[in-house]
Image (cartoon, helix red, strand yellow):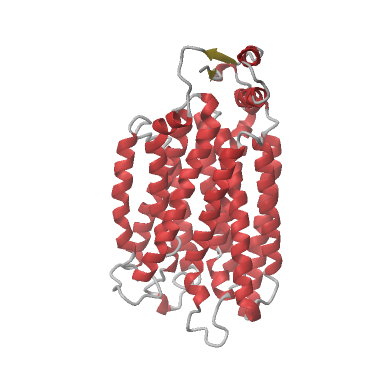
Amino acid sequence: MDVLHTGEKNPRFAPPDRYNLACFLMGMMGMGAMYPWNFFITAADYFHYSFRNTTDPAHPTTYQNVFENTLSIVATSCGVFGLIINTILTRYLSFKIRIYSGFIAITVIFTLTTVLTAVDTDSWQTGFFVVTMLSVFVINWASSWVNGGISGVQGCLPSHFSTAMMVGQAVAGLMASFASIFSVLSQRNTADRDMAVKNEGTGYFGSAVAASLLCTVGFAVFTRLPIVNYYLESLLTVRKIRETIDTTTTSTDYTKVVEETTTVTVDSSSEKFQFGLVIRRIWSHALVLMLTYGTTLAVFPAVASAVRSRNASDGSLINNDLFLPVACFLIVNAADFAGRLSHGFLLLPTPQQGSISLGITILRMGMIPMFLFCNALPREHLPVVFGDAVYVILLAVFIFTNGYFGNLGMMYGPKLVPPQFAETTGSIMALSLNTGLLLGSAFSFVLVYVL
């Protein structure tokens, strides 16, 4: 059968990216795809306080013990299903519709969460737990639509847009970390602990609402830039041909549709480039993404965010209220940011060396047991071997490799297939990433039990 080959867009003829605005907005879109997840996991202190034992705070409740694990499994499971549907709908709904609808849903959920921070939930903790998990489900479903759409779009753009997207995703984590630290510091002198926590939550999630609105406006501007429309022309042309071919019934009509499109040609002698052939080209990088993020989610946040300073008894702010926001979340997001940036001068392994990346990713899984011997609480079975410094260094290396290999996988995948399959390939890579998140989240239950 005939196959459509879309010509590569020549960067020499592309309109200028004035002030690097398009690249900046792509980074903002990457941030918009990831910050919902980061804001919920970084708010661990707020949720732990909300689910505390109101009669005996020294004894943790069931909701406190299972919060991170449940949060991870709910978020990643709905993310996987959302991306599956997103991949299917790439044929029927434009990326604009999918991304706009995702941002609107994210804004609504964050607004609801901000309102709930002002409500006394002590008398209905079970109901609040259910509402929180439903909110996590919806907001991560929406994020998967945004992530899938943006991943597909960046596959049609030059490689530095992929870097901008991945850096933006890391910035989302940094933004959430700094918002959390600022919230803690702003309420440190508030005598009423209940009021302090509510104020922290209101300011924290309120900033998330503002960020979602900013990303929505940013995407509207992004899609109107000449350089973006130049590179997306081939994607829109292929979509137009698909829609038209769906209504044609003869080979004559089929050929006529293609001939009317100047950016697409027909190669009658070549084999149809089917979905299976796409998988054969990208499978190693897709597997690297799945294992990289699966390994990370097995440890973070369930185990890593449960680690407390072994020097907490000194009563210092850094070893108590700020230990989790700084030693865990800030280190995680800073290391992830550095890992995503480092490929700019260390682009190894190459796209053709997917097996080497896969081998390194498998070796990285050996770091998981080391986290079990850090001071993660509560624990019943394993001894504490490592101190605070080892925990921070171990976490930094673990997350740096996550950012580095995650970036390479997302960047290499769409570049290994013809341009007309870049959007679908981007969605497949995003699906692989979220599948890893789901598997890692499920395995985190085992690690918490082993503690």
Q: Residue at x 63, y 56 (%)?
A: 138
Q: Residue at x 34, y 69 (%)?
A: 450
Q: Is residue 35 above or below residue 164?
A: below
- Please name whichever residue, 296 or 375, is drawn nearer the observer in this view of the structure: 296
Q: How many marks?
A: 0
Q: Is residue 401 left or right of residue 86?
A: left
Occupied quadrant, residue 352: top left
Q: Is residue 210 visible in this depiction of the protein?
A: no
Which quadrant does the C terminus fall into?
Answer: bottom left
Pinpoint residue 339: horizontal percent, then vertical percent: 42, 45
- Please name whichever residue, 242 or 134, is drawn nearer the observer in this view of the structure: 242
Pinpoint residue 342: horizontal percent, then vertical percent: 41, 40
Q: Is residue 355 above or below residue 272?
A: below
Q: Is residue 406 visible in this depiction of the protein?
A: yes
- Please name whichever residue, 175 or 263, is drawn nearer the observer in this view of the structure: 263
- Please name whichever residue, 383 or 152, is drawn nearer the observer in this view of the structure: 152
Q: Residue at x 54, y 40 (%)?
A: 165
Pinpoint residue 216: horizontal percent, then vertical percent: 69, 44
Pinpoint residue 160: horizontal percent, then vertical percent: 51, 32
Q: Residue at x 46, y 69 (%)?
A: 318
Q: Which residue extends farthest bottom?
A: 55
